[in-house]
Image (tube, coloured by chain):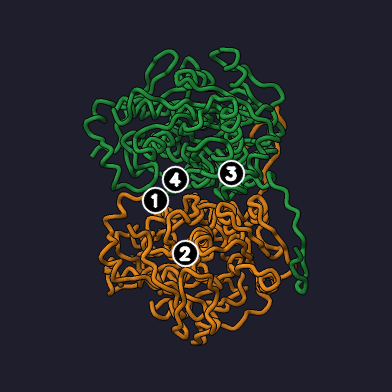
Chain colours: A green, B orange
Amino acid sequence: MTYSFVSHLHCPKCEKTYDVDEINQLCDCGAPLLVAYKMDELKENFTKEQLAERKPDLWRYHELLPVKNEENVTTLGEGMTPMLHLKKAGKDMGISNLYMKDEGMIPSGSFKSRGAAVGVSKAKEVGVKELAMPTNGNAGAAWSLYSAQADIKATIVMPVDAPEITRKECVAAGADLYLVNGLIGDAGKIVGQAVADYDLFDASTLKEPFRIEGKKTMGLEIAEQFGWKVPDVILYPTGGGVGLIGIYKALRELQELGWISEDKMPRLVAVQSTGCAPIVKAWEEGKTHAEPWENASTVAFGINVAKALGDFLILDGIKQTNGCAIAIDDETLLKELKFVASSEGAYVCPEGAAAFAAARKLRNDGWIKEDEEVVVLNTGAGIKYPDTIEVEAPILQKDEKVVR
Amino acid sequence: MTYSFVSHLHCPKCEKTYDVDEINQLCDCGAPLLVAYKMDELKENFTKEQLAERKPDLWRYHELLPVKNEENVTTLGEGMTPMLHLKKAGKDMGISNLYMKDEGMIPSGSFKSRGAAVGVSKAKEVGVKELAMPTNGNAGAAWSLYSAQADIKATIVMPVDAPEITRKECVAAGADLYLVNGLIGDAGKIVGQAVADYDLFDASTLKEPFRIEGKKTMGLEIAEQFGWKVPDVILYPTGGGVGLIGIYKALRELQELGWISEDKMPRLVAVQSTGCAPIVKAWEEGKTHAEPWENASTVAFGINVAKALGDFLILDGIKQTNGCAIAIDDETLLKELKFVASSEGAYVCPEGAAAFAAARKLRNDGWIKEDEEVVVLNTGAGIKYPDTIEVEAPILQKDEKVVR
């Protein structure tokens, strides 16, 4: 049985191709490489019906993933996260079919584990022994953990302001962790130097071709969870934007396989913070690339990315699907976070809260219609961000009692 | 279609029965009440094959759960957590079939969400409007969140030393939170008073009959994940012990349904801390009930329970399955926690780490054989316990570089 129908790597800018079984980073032209599959063979050998008997993790789609030998799979059970119909929150927003895909319920509590699971597995398969990456926290945590399982040595550089729990995860996994007085872009420069100095594999966002394949499984799952139809709108908190690019790629591949209709694509929405909104600015100005954002700052740390290497792919995905890009301020997203927790019992991450706030705003603006099916991606567990909630609780002595 | 085949409540001590659709707490004799099902009707109307088409959450077993009307189900997508074969850790321990069921991948990052999902749903069904409970943190967080979805007002009392993130979860969900300078037993006394003063539903462990039904789904899932066979040993970190009681109940029910063989039960192991080991002491002394543990203290806060109301059920479950009870010290469990994270990439909670350390010790003692199938329950996500890992990481300036 063929475990993967992966074919080769190709550049979406200059169309040069590369061998999928060799260690590759960016294309010679500087663009990120994408993974291509043998779609004709897939059509004949991979059916929806086969999925019914498989475990509820992302490896159920292994034919459409790049790892050729199952023995190279590093896994912690990631994938097939819940798709929840949020009736109370939806009613409040005037969206009767509001859904949350909860990526908090995944190893390390963040959707970054999808990219890490597939990225590390394929890195192992092509012979990587040491990797390095800059991170806003969650990706570094995920890559450290999967690298530990794969016996790959990981060097992680993150801003000192990144969520503190992610430091613990890196260290628990045995990674070499460095903090930097700066933003993820500064961490990226330090990683670039380390990669050159010590001949490491550069696992920076989109500088390796395989994390996008892990992220794309969100799109495969959304289609499967909607019964091989697609919702009308998908809102995605956008930093590096790999998830949005991956979801778009997944849906195109499913169309090519004939698993979903070619007549409908969900409108993809890139949600950013008003404190760091390069994609939104480029979108509003009708540009195909984004300018770096100056003095980026937001409580939604995971989307504090001043310059995304895949900006042109994000903007293209939005455009092709008649989507849009929208920015939310911190005060609004924190208010939405508390609303979702207290109405639905879902303690989401600030990035996910921004996407909820965006859904509310787009509904108010009429861009989202009342009965459309709307999916919000909550990209991580709220418990990784304790600072989003302030606690004032009475401290009782043993002989005291509750007074209401 | 009948959603639930629940029959009634009964007392395992005095055998008195109660109506399952009324608000009940303990039996008049003071013992916890258990839920009974119409097993004959279940045998005719519920088959393994029906499960294949259902979502991977615990409500897939709704016929064997107590909620009668699906509209009362409060859910965040809990259940069907991964069952991972840990080859590297197993090799190190000399256990070739070592598995981890990872309960960190569940809403609020702790297995307490199983009990809360079912407990709150049934509380809603019988008309509860306000509940109160003492907690070591995670249960209070879970019950707060599900109560929010169910429009039930929750009052939570936890020790000041409980994991800090759990305070945030309670407050985010809109619960009334109180901290107490003491242990969970002290919190329990304060809750008891509040229940009397304000006529609240007492959701303390085993004082309501339904959380055990939620916890039992761990046993149902283990059986399903092993192809309706059972492993040889299940190790379970034991505080209140509801999970162990629930797993035992689940397996007995599956035997009665004929879904698993009556010839084999897994040997159930109650894992405690040397700083709080009342069940281990009672087990070693051959007693049927446990004495309260004096000056209880351990880093594995979730199992810091000096006196469990269900002690006699735990001890019976161990005895009936030829299991055992074992205590692990904090230093040993913290070492095991780092080992599991750095070898498998699984950042487990300290309670789960204690269960891993217990597996290692029981293998060394020869109680576990080399080729036996051994399941360790990791009852929560390591990210809820940041203090288990110390971080010493260099802080770089923007113009500095990594020096190895």
Q: CA distance from mark 1 to mark 4?
A: 13 Å
Q: CA distance from mark 3 to mark 2?
A: 24 Å
Q: Which residue is found at the position 75% from the left and 70% from the top?
A: A401
Q: Are marks 1 and 3 in contact (CB under 8 Å)?
A: no
- According to the picture, the residue beneath numbered tag 4 turns out to be A78
Task: Determine the chain carrying the residue at label 3.
Answer: A
CB-based contact (under 8 Å), mark 3 and mark 2: no
Residue B216 appears at what percent x and percent y? Answer: 43, 66
Dot 4: chain letter: A
Mark carried by residue B56? 1
Q: Residue A348 shows which numbered tag?
A: 3
- Left or right: B100 with respect to B39? right
Label 1 sits on what residue type?
A: Pro
Judged left or right of residue B369, residue A148 is right
Secondary structure category for the residue under label 3: loop
On the image, the x and y values in percent for residue A386 come to 67, 47
Residue B125: numbered disc: none
Can residue B96 be seen here? no
Q: Are marks 4 and 2 in contact (CB under 8 Å)?
A: no
Checking the image for residue B215, the label placed there is 2
Label count reads 4
Say which residue appears at 72% left-offset and 70% top-offset. Answer: B182
Gap in angstroms between the C-alphas marked 1 and 2: 16 Å
